[in-house]
Amino acid sequence: MLPAKHIHIDDDSASILSFRTNSTSSSFNLSHRSSESYYQSSISKFASFQWVNNPSTHALFHWLNLKLKLPDRKQLAGPILDQAIKSIKQLRKEKLNQVHKQAGITLSFNGWKNIVNQELLGIMIILPSGETLIWKAVDISDQRGRAIDVIPKIERNIK
């Protein structure tokens, strides 16, 4: 059995206490397809891309592969983000077209205030399979808090 590697990373924003692998070396090759998955994962899970500039993240990826260089937040926020959004919208449209012909969908709404105190309304679509698609979030700060006042805005955003 090959010796195990250990990594210990600890800073203010994240903590990875131990990470173990049974190989003495690791290789990581970002093909076009896997890099697209990487970017989609980044967008869906860590929308602000703050994790990319985190020293713990750099240490982990450096440990995985010394030659791997992560893009920074500015690189991810440019054309990469635009392309990922475009492909996610296309995928969402394809799924809705498939389901539309077979069965109905369920709309789900969620309201919250963000850090700058804007009132936001999130619109999600739940497919018959149980899969949830995020449609969009809209600023409803200029609307009153009653559902009857927000319904016209919802109808405009769903079309």
Image (tube, rainbow, N blue to C red):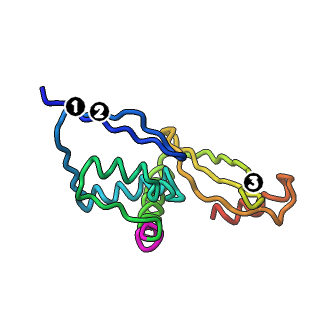
Residue topped by disc 3: 113
Question: Tag 2's secondary structure?
Answer: strand
* Residue type for callout 1: Ala
User: Residue sitting at 64 percent across and 61 percent down?
Assistant: 158
Q: Position of residue 121 (x, y in %)?
A: 71, 55
Residue topped by disc 1: 4
Residue 20 has which mark? 2
Q: Position of residue 65 (x, y in %)?
A: 24, 51
Q: Position of residue 15 (x, y in %)?
A: 47, 40
Q: Which is nearer the N-term, disc 2 or disc 3?
A: 2
User: Residue sitting at 36 percent across and 50 percent down?
Assistant: 59
Disc number lying in front (2 or 3): 2
Question: Tag 1's secondary structure?
Answer: loop
Chain part drawn in magenta: 75-82
Q: Position of residue 9 (x, y in %)?
A: 41, 42
Location of the N terminus by quadrant is top left
* Residue type for callout 3: Lys
Q: Which is nearer the N-term, disc 3 or disc 1?
A: 1
Q: CA distance from mark 3 to mark 1?
A: 46 Å
Q: Which is nearer the N-term, disc 1 or disc 2?
A: 1
Q: Nearer the viewer, residue 49 or 97?
A: 49
User: Residue sitting at 58 percent across and 49 percent down?
Assistant: 125
* Residue type for callout 2: Arg
User: Residue sitting at 13 percent across and 30 percent down?
Assistant: 2
Q: Are marks 2 and 3 in contact (CB under 8 Å)?
A: no
Q: Are marks 1 and 2 in contact (CB under 8 Å)?
A: yes
Question: Tag 3's secondary structure?
Answer: strand
Q: CA distance from mark 2 to mark 3?
A: 40 Å
